[in-house]
Amino acid sequence: MVFILFISFVVLLRIGELLLSKSNEKWLLRNGAVEYGQKHYPFIVVLHVLFIISVIFEYSRQLNPTYSLFFIIFYFVLLSLKAWVILSLGKFWNTRIYRIPDIPLINKGPFRYFKHPNYLIVIAEIAVIPLIFDLYYTAITFSMLNVIMLFTRVKNENKALQI
């Protein structure tokens, strides 16, 4: 039951992020934004969908609260950090890479400390979500795939942001 509730929560959050992203995308495009890295975006979507499917597929035991409680707490810390990123970027936050020419980069919130804080959070999320339920194959496999994907993503984003 805990697994079903948790994975449903994760999926609903992802859907919420996509809806927010779509709303922000409309605003960005109305304000002259240019998209970068369109070719790799479908692979990111597939990776994240397969990740959820893999978590569900590999799951085969009950939640162990003594071990998993740490990762559940860690996951919610990650969510608060992700909220900080999203709030710091405001309408500029998106799952795609957009840049409005001649608009200065956001340099507040976690962006004072890291160039790409959202990707650090996503790397941790991809590892932590399956570790809550001892799903080591999913944690390792998708962590590696995600890091490989992020090399392309960060390269495209750096090009867009000219950093």
Image (spheres, rainbow, N blue to C red):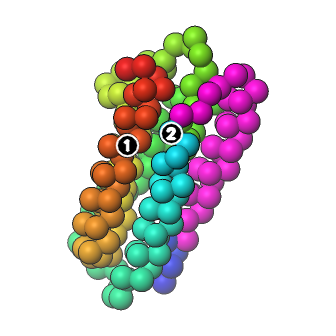
Quarter holding the C terminus is top left
Q: Which residue does the image show at 50% across and 39% down from the upper left?
A: 37
Q: Which residue does the image show at 35% across and 28% down from the upper left?
A: 115
In this view of the protein, can residue 9 be seen by the observer? no
**Could you tell me which secondary element the residue under label 1 belongs to?**
helix
Q: Give amino acid for label 1.
A: Thr
In this rendering, the count of numbered labels is 2
Q: For mark 1, does the 10 Å Cα neighbourhood hold few (<14), some (14 to 19), or many (20 or more) residues?
A: few
Q: Give amino acid for label 2.
A: Gly
- Percent x, y for residue 107? 43, 18
The reply to whether the magenta stretch includes residue 21 is yes
Question: Which portion, as a residue range, is magenta?
Answer: 8-36
- Percent x, y for residue 25? 67, 37
In this view of the protein, can residue 20 be seen by the observer? yes
**Could you tell me which secondary element the residue under label 2 belongs to?**
loop
Instruction: Return the disc, 2 or 1, that comes first in the chain's sequence.
Output: 2
Label 1: which residue?
152
Res. 37 mark: 2
- Quadrant in which residue 154 is drawn: top left
The reply to whether the magenta stretch includes residue 50 is no
- Percent x, y for residue 47? 44, 62
- Answer yes or no: do the residues labelled 2 and 1 have beta carbons within 8 Å? yes
Q: For mark 2, does the 10 Å Cα neighbourhood hold few (<14), some (14 to 19), or many (20 or more) residues?
A: some
